[in-house]
Amino acid sequence: MKVFCVIVFVFSFVFVANTEKDDEILVFTVATEETDGFQRYLESAEFYDIKPIVLGYGAEWRGGNIKKGPGGGFKINLLKKAIEPHKNDASKIILFTDGFDVVFVDKLQEVLERFRKFEAKILFGAEKFAWPDPLLAEQYPEVTEGKRFLNSGAYIGYAPEVYELLTREEIQDDGDDQLFFTKAYLDEEFRQKHQFKLDHKSEIIQNINGAATELEVKVIEDKEANTEIYKIRNTLFYTDPLILHGNGAAKQSLNYISNYVPNSWNSIEGCITCLKNQVSLKEIDDEKLPLVMIGIFVEIPTPFLEEMLEKVYNLEYPKNRIHLFVHNAVQYHSDVVSKFIEEQGVDYLSVKQIKPSDGTTEHAARDLSLDYCLVKKCDSYLSLDSIAHLDNPQTLKLLIEQNRTIVAPMLTRPGRAWSNFWGSLTAEGYYARSNDYMNIVWNEKRGLWNVPFVTNAYLLNATLLNKYDRSQINYKNGLLDADMSFCANLRNLDVFIYVSNRVDFGHLVNPETYDLTLAEPDMYQIFENEKEWEERYIHEDYPGNFDPENAPKQPCPDVYWFPVVSRKFTSSLINMMETFGKWSTGKNDDDRLEGGYEAVPTRDIHMNQVGWERHWLHFLQKYVRPLQELVFIGYYHDPPKSLMNFVVRYKPDEQPSLRPHHDSSTYTINVALNQVGEDYVGGGCRFIRYNCSVVDTKPGWILMHPGRLTHFHEGLRVTSGTRYIMISFIDP
Ligand SMILES: *[C@@H]1O[C@H](CO)[C@@H](O)[C@H](O)[C@H]1NC(C)=O
Ligand SMILES: *[C@@H]1O[C@H](CO)[C@@H](O)[C@H](O)[C@H]1NC(C)=O
Ligand SMILES: *[C@@H]1O[C@H](CO)[C@@H](O)[C@H](O)[C@H]1NC(C)=O
């Protein structure tokens, strides 16, 4: 591909010799610069061995602003000059297409054969809209089937007739080419004389605007070559167009289609485009690796931020090739962010921190980060939002190696269809779902996908920042939010935006229910962010409980002992309770209970008093019940029920111990929340029938014992400090 591009660009003003087979057809396009769309055009041409002659390359565009309004006379004037030598050669056929938004999906031979069947001397593509002058619509001949109006993005004709068409009138470079051709077509005499026709049913040319829903990506198996070919089917006219033009608002549709055609992806070879233009960092010495800036944006209260930052730190890339830029807008997170910067930040080349007190808006901070990247002369810029967890430490390297202007690692909420990209766009520029969105999100299709929008995590090649003005590349675009603005600006520049799910890169946390008014808000995230919750709060040895080699510990008869929750869990639970602070009086009267009476009262706080009962019951079901089934065989109760779930506080001057009693439960769990010998002296649980005590309890370990009959027990005296335990009476 690379070699091919070079040839085209070097000889772009010279006629490139055609292959013998396509001897009589010359393909022209106009491209003034190398955009992603133009590169795609060339790649599709190369795939079918088509050698287009590129006009105007490197020239300043003089055709007006086509996106905003009419323009394009420049194209006519360039082509006129280029085909002048052939104006008398009736054996030459001219095929003209736009360069930025066209894709070939078949060979020229096929184009020629179909063109001959039209018995036309000039054939233009057709479209649904009469543009640029809708008032001319009624002058068009009626059609019984097919699209009625002319589009000038692609046309084909014999050289003498095309030349006559181009010279029919003078046109300014900034004049409107489509209007120019429309007038010629509506001139009945000219039309008849030159057998000037429109391809109403997209037999050759498919203008996609207004027709996207008629098109289907169609798979053809090629058994011989053990591959698949993707074609486009027009389901309205039962045709298979050969040239696709993503005119006007249809650019996104063409981007979607070109994720498959002509040869981007198939289910046998997988992602073919992925392999193009890749770079390798393997042979590069550390100190010569691209200079990276990582921008971290904490714009909203975010669960599990520490872990997110830890994953940034764990990215495998030399820290002395990374500048950090951190914007934190959330006061609550200041400690975690500052700690990260103080402890880990020193390893990086530099760190710039913007604090909540600076009052910088998200838009401004993101724009500032681009400036900072330019100042630091960074080669690549990785933008990360606080909800983006890069679990794969290779992510940064892999994204750099992918070598795209902008590429996002696909991140999803685990088990959800929520992701950091959009497959499609509404006409207003908002979210729409593409046909393949689910296949991509669930990794049924893996590859590199051209999409209209990415967010939360993406790598930007800094050449983009140098190529365009900062007034074109920024996070401001009307009232849209920052990333929507950013992507809209990139789309306006025809920069292709990619998302990759070639491998698993990571996931998104869900911040929707994160409530900073709670003490220990992350503890409440057991439902929304299960994965992080488990990683932070479940004991690292928990899985070992199920190892058959590993008999459960039994400190007393039928009293089992398991590591279940982490130290972070135990200290967080204590903090939740102490922050709430309304410990019970330890009297028999207890208005929190249905009967209003507690026979063996403790100083405690119930889980429902801190709004954590639902969470605790889920915890019992998911983590405790399987342990019970392991040791009390044959008892099966799912979900476990528990009405009494509470944290008890023992201290010498309050309640130091608890008299012997039975629990009203089938079985009880008793979780040690702090460390004997460090946080308190004494304490423990004595099972009277067996004269057996457990005193060396370990934080995060659960004691599990039968409730009603055999395990009469007492709480041993705490002689100094404060002891906390968490109790549940399961299946009362
Ligand atoms: C990286 O991408 C650019 C732009 O597409 C291309 O010009 C360059 O050749 C690519 N690098 C490699 C090593 O392929
Ligand atoms: C990315 O930047 C490097 C220079 O750092 C450049 O060589 C490469 O072509 C760029 N790739 C793209 C896709 O722009
Ligand atoms: C109970 O155990 C303790 C220590 O193990 C022992 O000193 C005591 O005599 C035992 N009591 C009875 C009644 O067996």
Image (cartoon, grey):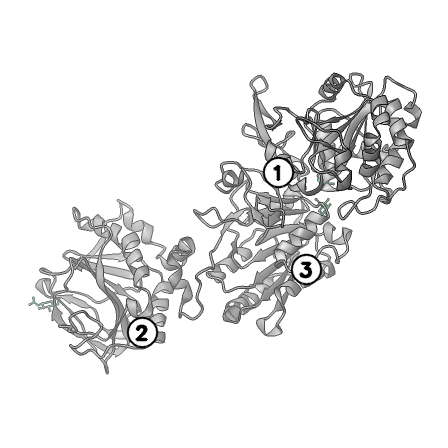
Identified by mark 3, the residue type is Lys
The residue singled out by tag 2 in the image is 679
Write down the quadrant of residue 108 in the picture: top right
Quarter of the image for the C terminus: give it.
Answer: bottom left
Q: Where is residue 480 drawn, in percent x and y? A: 63, 58
Q: Alpha carbon of mark 1 to alpha carbon of mark 3: how far? A: 26 Å
Identified by mark 2, the residue type is Asp
The residue singled out by tag 1 in the image is 256
Ligand 3 rendered quadrant: bottom left
Q: In this orientation, which residue lies closer to the viewer: 212 or 189?
A: 189
Earlier in the chain: of badge 2 and badge 3, it is 3
| Label 1 element class | helix
Q: In this orientation, which residue lies closer to the viewer: 230 or 234?
A: 234
Q: Where is residue 161 drawn, in percent x and y? A: 87, 24
The residue singled out by tag 3 in the image is 476
Q: Alpha carbon of mark 2 to alpha carbon of mark 3: how far? A: 54 Å
Mark 2 or 3: in front is: 3
Earlier in the chain: of badge 1 and badge 2, it is 1
Identified by mark 1, the residue type is Tyr
Q: Residues within 10 Å of mark 3 (few under 14, many from 20)?
A: many
Q: Does residue 356 appear in the picture of this structure?
A: yes
